Amino acid sequence: MRAANRGDSRAYRRLLDEIAPVLRTVVRARGAALGAQSCEDVLQDVLLAVHTKRNTWRDDAPLRPWLYAIARHKVIDAFRARGRRVELPIDAFEDVLPAASAPDPTEGRDMEKVLNALDPRSAEIVRAFGLKGESTAETAARLDMSEGAVRVALHRALKSIARLRERMIE
Amino acid sequence: MKTDELISMLSADTLPRITVQQRLMRALPAAMLVSTLALIGAWGIRPDIAAALGSAAVLKHVLPLGLVALAGAVAVALVHPAMPVMRRMPVLGVFGAILFCVFALALSRQGLSGLTDALVTPSLLVCLLSIPVLATPFLVAALWALSAGAALRPHLAGAAAGLCAGGAGAAIYALYCDQDAILFVLPAYFAAILVVALIGALAGPRALKW
């Protein structure tokens, strides 16, 4: 995390890869009744919060208490909001719906909705990093932008995503 | 979107986020400018300001500024998850207790009639209204800065921001206020600052949501 806050993208990715399964277990233990997909949405909320609030971790402090405090807050928030929404289990429609392939358990739905609400340019950049796994240089070349501009655009897009998801939760 | 994809997306964003301290550095001077100009324009500065700053009345600035520092430290700790707040809270408590002792001492010397004599002036209402008004720019600035953090207890963080802003408002109002009696300053300033803290506590959950 220390390296990540200094801008080391690879170290940051390793960290997120490590904490995601831990957080997933926590979220699933708490929200088993909601179904795997909603749990994944909550997990994505938590990861987004870790990302947007990473500046509130002081690098001389242990990471774990900070991480759990962030996760706890976000998990409570997310479940409170989702509890209010009615979630119909899909089993009830099994006979009516055409058989679909089993959904990927690490697939969330909410993020798609948010991306669709974003302006097309930002969504394009975000997708380039997320779905296609492009590097900054590749995206910059493809969209005819400077690397710095791509970085700033991604930074801004993630900020709006965090804001939009918050609004969805309310 | 898959969680894996989200992770690649997040890890590509390596620009540093602005910190609470950076925002405070940006917002507080602006708030100070607004409040001071408002005081000079609408209230005016007491004519004997030079003499007052040379006497014990300078405490009307020093003590509120002390409150700004202490409450500010608590507020900053409150928006950094897992940062120990408990070490900073007692200092604030001791500060309040000392002021209360001073108040009790003055009260025992001059009695209740002394208190009513000191408080029953038109200045009381002016003070109770002016401090919150002068504190408003500071409260807005503090809440804006704190919203860059992550408040786990937004009511409490908002109240600390309110105490901080109230202290700043009081320190500025003291440039105008010509009542120097302990039995006026302590209860009146305390009540006015408390109003700001209350507003902060109510605004906290909304302003510090994340």
Image (cartoon, coloured by chain):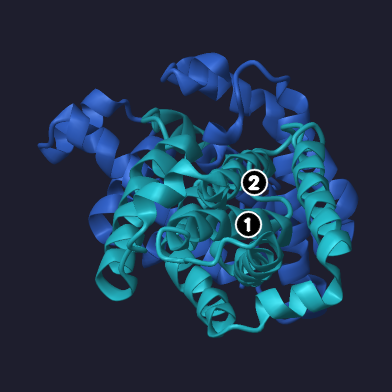
- Residue B148 lies, in percent from the top left, at 50, 47
- Name the secondary structure under disc 1: helix
Residue found at x 64% / y 66%: B205
Residue found at x 52% / y 60%: B170
Q: Colour of chain B?
A: cyan
Q: Quadrant of residue A170?
A: bottom right
Task: Check if mark 1 and mark 2 are on a common chain.
Answer: yes
Residue found at x 29% / y 75%: B42
- Name the secondary structure under disc 2: helix
Q: Residues within 10 Å of mark 1 (few under 14, many from 20)?
A: many
What mark, if any, has residue B3 been given in the picture?
none
**Above-or-below relation of A19 to A26:** above
Q: Amino acid at mark 2?
A: Ala
- Residue B59 lies, in percent from the top left, at 57, 46
User: For this view, does B159 lie left or right of residue B16?
Assistant: right
The subunit carrying tag 2 is B
User: For this view, does B99 lie left or right of residue A53?
Assistant: right
Q: Is residue A21 visible?
A: no
- The residue that mark 1 highlights is B163
Evaluate if marks 1 and 2 touch, with contact meaning CB atoms under 8 Å apart: yes
The chain drawn in blue is A
- The residue that mark 2 highlights is B71
Numbered circles on residues, count: 2
User: For this view, does B179 lie left or right of residue A143?
Assistant: right
Q: Which of the two discs, 1 and 2, labels the residue nearer the N terminus?
A: 2
**Above-or-below relation of A97 to B175:** below
